[in-house]
């Protein structure tokens, strides 16, 4: 038995010395230590030995098994290290060679301005809310005091879907969702993308961005609205800008106003963006209509509020002096790199 053990020790050693690949090492392991390996099979013969020989034979078998197992691990580690060295040598590169400049993207100017607006409004205690771009007729029109066949629907050419829903034409539906979710006092903004089925030109797009604003509390007045708008514009442009407030009709506010900004592209002199008027329609606003408060389950006898729909895309045009709204969706990297 001892002779056979020594023969297996020598044979396993020779097999591992000759192993030049990890597959060779695995084959040697299976041959000697596998379920049907030679050492395993010999160990099964211990039961046939005389009782007085079993302890010594058991010690010899355990020593053999441990030695062969250790030799297999050592040979495997040596080959793995050798393979790694070969791979590193094959992939070697000259660290003195000049590198390739990696190009970085930039935040879209609309996103830059949106983030800035969120900072401004959150500093004044406003929440930032979101709403779905695919809306129901109820939230986009009915709850905003625009019932079916109301002439105001003609003011917003709409992308209708086959199931009766629509692509929202403004961010105003978030007003109703905010009133359904929160109780007064409410201070919230909702930036987002909106859609209109209309012809594009330098100042009109079928996909653009707005920022809805809503304040509801006791004793809210037009004075609060004007203060909030002036604060907003002063902070975003980092200087005082000329504005005008004129009457405007929007079914969801009463009274309603159009806040116009003196065109910063032409300094009020007239250009294609302002249609030669010197003014850009920027911010429809007004006091929240009592019917809209009722749709949001808020008592108009107890609370009042103001709302506004900031033309975010147009604001970006004024902020950066961009004279064509179509640039934002054109995908021209030369245009976008200016804002990196």
Image (tube, rainbow, N blue to C red):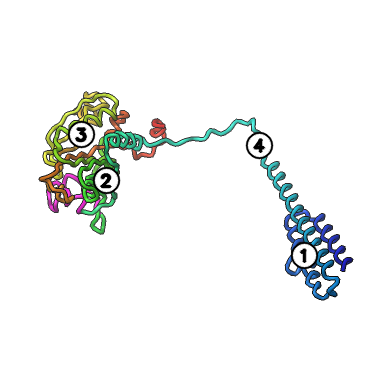
Residue at screen point 84% across, 58% down: 14
Real-space CA distance between mark 1 and mark 2, rounded to the nearest whole angstrom: 72 Å
Q: Earlier in the sequence, mark 2 or mark 4?
A: 4
Is residue 240 or residue 196 the one in the foreground?
Answer: 240
Q: Earlier in the sequence, mark 3 or mark 1?
A: 1
Q: Earlier in the sequence, mark 1 or mark 2?
A: 1
Q: Earlier in the sequence, mark 3 or mark 2?
A: 2
Q: Quadrant of the N terminus?
A: bottom right
Relative to 257, is 127 on the left or the right?
right
Residue at screen point 82% across, 76% down: 48
Relative to 95, is 8 on the left or the right?
right
Residue underneath mark 1: 31
Real-space CA distance between mark 3 and mark 2, rounded to the nearest whole angstrom: 18 Å
Residue underneath mark 3: 281
- Magenta highlight range: 138-160
Real-space CA distance between mark 3 and mark 1, rounded to the nearest whole angstrom: 86 Å
- Is label 1 in contact with label 4 (beta carbons under 8 Å)? no
Residue at screen point 76% across, 58% down: 69
In what element is the residue under mark 2? Answer: strand
* Farthest right residue in view: 3
Q: Quadrant of the C terminus?
A: top left
Q: Position of residue 334 (x, y in %)?
A: 41, 33
Residue underneath mark 4: 93
In what element is the residue under mark 4? Answer: loop
- Is label 3 in contact with label 1 (beta carbons under 8 Å)? no
Is residue 315 or residue 39 the one in the foreground?
Answer: 39
Q: Position of residue 135 (x, y in %)?
A: 25, 52
Q: Which mark is residue 195?
A: 2
Q: Earlier in the sequence, mark 3 or mark 4?
A: 4
């Amino acid at each position: 038995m001892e002779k056979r053990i020594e023969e297996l020790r020598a044979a396993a050693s020779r097999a591992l010395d000759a192993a030049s690949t990890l597959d060779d090492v695995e084959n040697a392991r299976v041959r000697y230590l596998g379920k049907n390996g030679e050492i395993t099979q010999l160990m099964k013969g211990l039961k046939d030995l005389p009782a007085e020989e079993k302890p010594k034979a058991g010690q010899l078998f355990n020593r053999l098994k441990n030695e062969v197992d250790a030799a297999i691990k050592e040979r495997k580690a040596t080959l793995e290290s050798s393979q790694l060295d070969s791979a590193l040598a094959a992939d070697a590169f000259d660290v003195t060679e000049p590198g390739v400049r990696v190009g970085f993207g930039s935040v879209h100017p609309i996103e830059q301005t949106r983030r800035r607006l969120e900072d401004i409004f959150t500093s004044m205690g406003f929440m930032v809310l979101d709403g779905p771009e695919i809306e129901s007729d109820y939230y986009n029109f009915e709850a905003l005091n625009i019932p079916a066949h109301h002439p105001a629907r003609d003011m917003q050419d709409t992308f209708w879907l086959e199931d009766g829903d629509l692509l929202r034409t403004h961010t105003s539906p978030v007003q109703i969702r905010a009133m359904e979710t929160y109780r007064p006092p409410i201070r919230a903004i909702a930036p987002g993308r909106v859609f209109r089925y209309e012809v594009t030109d330098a100042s009109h797009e079928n996909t653009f961005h707005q920022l809805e604003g809503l304040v509801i509390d006791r004793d809210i007045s037009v004075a609060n609205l004007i203060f909030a708008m002036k604060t907003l514009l002063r902070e975003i442009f980092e200087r005082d800008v000329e504005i005008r407030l004129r009457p405007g009709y929007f079914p969801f506010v009463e009274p309603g106003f159009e806040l116009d900004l003196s065109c910063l592209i032409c300094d009020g002199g007239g250009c294609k963006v302002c249609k030669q008027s010197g003014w850009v329609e920027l911010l429809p606003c007004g006091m929240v209509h009592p019917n809209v408060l009722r749709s949001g389950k808020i008592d108009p006898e107890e609370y009042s509020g103001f709302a506004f729909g900031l033309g975010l895309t147009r604001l970006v045009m004024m902020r950066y002096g961009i004279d064509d709204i179509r640039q934002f969706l054109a995908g021209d990297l030369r245009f976008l790199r200016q804002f990196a």
